[in-house]
Image (cartoon, rainbow, N blue to C red):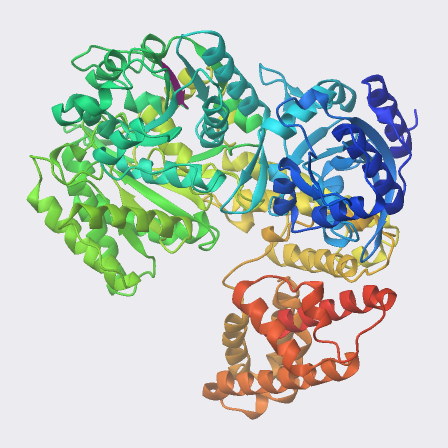
Amino acid sequence: MATQSEQALENLLIKQLESLEYERVAVVSENDLLANLKRQLEKHNKTTFSEIEFKRITNHLNKGNVFDKAKILRDKFVLTLDNGETKYIEFLDSEHWCQNLFQVTNQVTIEGNYKNRYDVTILINGLPLVQIELKKRGVELKQAFNQINRYQKHSFQSNSALFGYVQVFVISNGVNTKYYANNKKQSFKQTFFWADKKNQNITNLEAFTDDFLERCHISKMICKYIVLAEVDKILMVLRPYQYYAAEAIIDRVTNSDKNGYIWHTTGSGKTLTSFKASQILMKLPQVHKVVFVVDRKDLDFQTTKEFNSFSDGSVDGTDNTKALVKQFSDDTKLIVTTIQKLNTAISKSRYQESMEGVKDKHIVFIFDECHRSQFGETHLRITNFFENNQMIGFTGTPIFAQNAVGNKMGKRTTVELFDDCLHKYVITDAIKDDNVLKFSIEYVGRYKEKKDSANNVDIEVENIDIKELLESNDRLNKITDYIIDNHARKTHSGEFNAMFAVSGIPTLTKYYDLFKSKREAGEHKLKVATIFSYSANEDDQNADGVYESDGANVDDAHINQHSRDKLESYIQDYNQIFNTKFTTKDSQSYYNYYNDISKRVKSREIDILLVVNMFLTGFDSKMLNTLYVDKNLKYHGLIQAFSRTNRIVNEKKSQGNIVCFRNLKEQTDEAIALFSNKEAKDVILMKPYEEYVELFNKAFMALISIAPSVSSVDGLINEDDQLEFIKAFRELMRLKNVLTGFSDFNFADLSMGEQQFEDYKSKYLDLYEKVKSNTEVEKVSILDEVDFELELIHKDEINVAYILRLLAQYRETDTAKHAEYKKSIINIIAGQEHLRSKRELIEEFIDSHLMGIAVDDIDDEFEKFWEEQKVGEFGTLCKDEGLVEEEVRAVVETYLYDQRKPLADDIAKTLQSKPKLLERKKIIPRVLDKIMEHIEKFYEL
């Protein structure tokens, strides 16, 4: 049976949309698009526009970037009419989303830097708000994603720039269909399947269209469930489970007075869900205020920042209880606070009079991480004080009877406190959807104990839990050495970083001192930082991760002075490394220290963060991929701690690494069974090392069936064969990426040798260079849309400095070995995508300069040679292209400063003579490419 063509898929989709009451309209050009927009806006606004009036509208619409346009779309425009009067023009009815006008068209052609023809476009009130790109069955879905990226670069912002108004992209090959917001910053990892309420993915295009592209639903998604994140200036769209949770919360508040909770696994984006739900609840006439409650000051800072990142200034953060009380009485609709301050506000007599006025108001409380914040007298006090309250809880790890911890109130479960679960999305759902990563768990450390003194027989005991042994200096020293030896492997040479959770402050101080002494001895260069509470209850007493103390509270009556002195000395180490001035001597400085650590972990300035309990819940960093564990964990504490490592970021981060120095296997199995099901281990945990070796060897056999030798890759003339080679080698790279995260990894275990891998990688990069250099106006290569996943190749430690060290070794080798050594260096360069542009220069330096200079002078001579070549090529570039040197230098300096690719207007300023419009479309992209090649070659070392 023949494969369904892309054209057939397109025709069927359009027919289906027509059956869903979309109006079919023929719009194939820019002029058609504008003419149709005029008609639809007139119809939607029940008016007519003169050509001059419509020109004012299109001028207004042609402002700003995608983020600016998203705001324009949602605002009304004050149009000055020809007679001098003004009229409000609405582009989108966000309150009555079904009453917008819906059309579908296909093959719209827009000419920007290149001519692009788009597959299927959904027009709402004449504006292209949904763009659908299709590929025939069997083609990688990522190709459609890459094609949209190319459109964003080449033509979406061209001419009238109406395609800058696209809110949602849909990509499909018929079998698999995904959607995502118009956000250039996201990768293919941030594309989503739609699903039903039970988290069953709807992947088939026909079923997806019936559900997601139904007119009222897609309009509702655009009007209610796209978030304009102010800090990053990007659009975000809710995933299906976030949508169902928000809808369930709104329904619960609108139609009942009952409470409820949302069970969404850690790392699934609860803050975005709660923000969007809060934003909608604020607008309900029956809701007086929405109060978002967290349980510690550190989370108050983080959550306030996250809420404000979605809508800048939407949250008026409360620094003290007095400010909180004022917010309850003023017109603030959304409050973010801690449970501690909320408790003070309703308990202290000095606030009684101010708080009396809101006791009977309908206030919706949303509790973040409600598995930690609500199990005590405070919960009862809040519910008794606010007589008309509704409580909504969010948790990734609910409290059940099995994992409940007793206190004065007895053992309380999440259901007892919050009523029923409104929506559930567990860790197995998130892993299935590629929303979080699996865990790779390695157990390190086996101890010998005398079984029988008479027989003098040693047996291996993994589950030993003897305090003296666990805290022995010898054991801690060996673990420290193990981490130092394996940290680069676990974190991909520092591209990610780690947290180290230990059992208590005494053990933490020993570890910190070991790391510090070994750094001073030159045994490692890792930046290790720590933070802990120096009150008495920070030690791991219950070994379950549940703790009620406020980590930022320094007024505890039971302060451990020795712990405080230790932490003060560690903060001074931190101050010396990062040129800061923090201290434990006042609470605000300690709080600022916490915030600074949080930022530096996220920016990878800290390699390992040593903690007892702090940061093991409520802290998110995409760049943290490893957790070292030397403490007992179980149930929700274990899942929460492990989940610090499993945020999605890119292809290189393939799993969260958990390195256990205690045997937590039984506790891990119990936690997985409690929070998903007993059969979920295979979904949540990575396979053993041996299985990935077997998978790699199978993938290698698939590769050599396509290209039996390295040289045979050159014989792959047909692009379909080249594509098969690219896919096969990319799979090898993915598997090697996983394997290198294991401490046991050794190339000797694989069927493919390391040099053979590097040789094939060079050929792979040759094909990438071929695609990269393709500058045809129309796409002519099926390889154009292949994602080469170059992040799996890049290695930070192989740079120009590394190559200089090799050149010094080359200089000192026997002349007879020079040819072989030079070939080795060139192979290394060829295997690194970021060095390939420098290959000819390095070869020239070897051939014409290297042997005539002393080893000690290589660095200086190379730098001199490099500068001469840079100046020479810069002059040639400016002369050949007719550029103003000063303007080109300004473009280069701006790029090096803010890493922003130059805009067309920036390039236009460099031209000595201003070209005509048609010439400009060809000249500017060419000059831009040449300037970027110059930067890549000479500046990005």
Dominant secondary structure (helix, strand or loop) of the stretch shown in magenta: strand
Magenta stretch encompasses residue 731 = no
Residue at screen point 61% across, 24% down? 95
| Residue 331 sits in quarter | top left
Q: Is residue 278 above or below residue 157?
A: above
783 relative to 305 in the view: left or right: right
Whether residue 434 is visible here, answered yes or no, is yes
Residue at screen point 62% across, 62% down? 832
Relative image position of residue 144 (x, y in whole percent)? 76, 40
Q: Nearer the viewer, residue 917 or 303?
A: 917
Q: Which residues are magenta?
A: 390-395
Relative image position of residue 260 (x, y in whole percent)? 41, 12
From the image, which quarter does the N terminus lie in? top right
Whether residue 615 is visible here, answered yes or no, is no
354 relative to 419 in the view: left or right: left
From the image, which quarter does the C terminus lie in? bottom right
